[in-house]
Amino acid sequence: MKFQMNLTTSYDDVIRFASAQDLQNFYRRYGLDGLEVMPLPYSSAEAPGDYLSPELCPLLTPDMINGVHCCCSGDWMDKDRQRLIEGYRRDLDYAMRMGAEYVVFHVVQVDNEEGMIYKPKHTDREVIDAAADFINELLDGQKYDFWFLMENLWWPGLTFLHPEDTRALLEQVHYKKKGFMLDTGHFLHTNLDLQTQEEGVAYLHAMLDQHRDMISYIKGIHLQQSLTGDYVKQWLQEPHEMPKDPAEQFCWIYEHIFRIDKHEPFTATGVRELVERIDPLYVTYEYITRSREELGKYLEMGRLR
């Protein structure tokens, strides 16, 4: 079992570290084996407004990267398919060049309106069927050798709420080294009544009970939590008007999403046993933080070894 932390190649993340050695010393301090990287456009401290290829980020070397998280599109089913394929192939090719052992891919469809009002326009199975077809087009005939791990969210797609849908995704995807990246926090968002982390652990075990024959396909865990059901309930009771300006709309939507999906340490009694029950190949402490100091604090709070 390998442990890693998440990192993007965006300015906000890379500005925290002085060098590759500084970054490596940092994550090793918390008992980590490496990184799960999302390859966003890279900007340096000297030119924060210049957006460069993530491969130019001087902090990262192949020996540091265990996994690559694809830059996933949430609202994609009616978009230009060829452009989507090209974008994902850039991430997958980056993963190959960096020697990643796995990649992460979101199985979801949600537009801005759905994210605001929680009224889905597609069923989980509709999204799963469409995603499986897309994944097959993306991977068939390619010479990739990493694990392709499909991640759950709380919007239509892979949610782990219905074992028959989970199984349908597995059966439809052709790629041999396929599996799941279970995001614990995302799964907790499917139950707005959860009040404590301990309730969250029990809720996850109940899901695993329903997926007993598929637990072995959970090759990775994004270990995090945020209990924000009360916030969502309150939000849905109030009227909201989405900004018309695209830039303002983007910021408004992501502020709302980050209030739901806070990505904080999962520290409840029983988390270690939950991870041991799944016995994944990879555990990523996937946190959203505002500074190097807060990241270190979160890693210390959530560490399992």
Image (cartoon, rainbow, N blue to C red):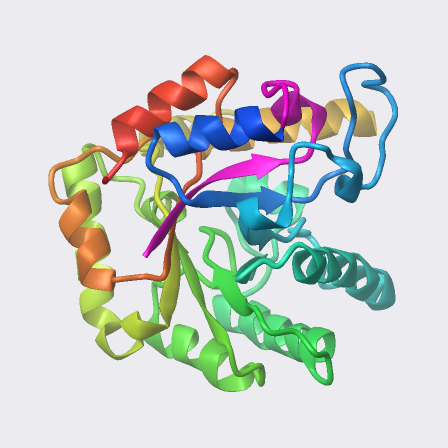
Give the answer, above or below, for where 195 lies relative to 138. above
**Extreme residue in the front direction:** 21
Q: How many marks?
A: 0
Q: Is residue 23 left or right of residue 297?
A: right
262 part of magenta stretch:
no
Residue for point 66% across, 54% down = 98
Instruction: Name the image quarter holding the N terminus.
Output: bottom left
Which picture quadrant has residue 112? Answer: top right
**Is 12 located above or below residue 79 in the figure?**
above
Q: Which residues are magenta?
A: 1-19
Query: Who is closer to the viewer here, 114 or 87?
Result: 87
- Res. 87 visible in picture: yes
Going 85% across and 17% down the picture, which residue do you hit? 47
Q: What is the x, y in percent for residue 107? A: 55, 62
Residue 14 horizontal/vertical position (percent):
65, 25
> Foreground: 302 or 78?
302
Left or right for 191, reference 252:
left
Where, quadrant-wise, is the C terminus in this rendering? top left
Q: Quadrant of residue 129?
A: bottom right
Q: In this orientation, does residue 239 appear?
A: no
* Residue 279 position (above or below residue 260): below
- Write the residue at 47% across / 44% down: 34
Along the line of sight, the residue nearer the viewer: 235 or 47: 47
Residue 152 drawn at (x, y percent): 45, 57
Q: Is residue 264 left or right of residue 24?
A: left
- The structure residue drawn at horizontal position 64% and vertical position 39%, both measured from the top left corner, is 60
Q: Would you identify the image quadrant in which residue 226 lies?
A: top left
Residue 6 lies, in percent from the top left, at 50, 39
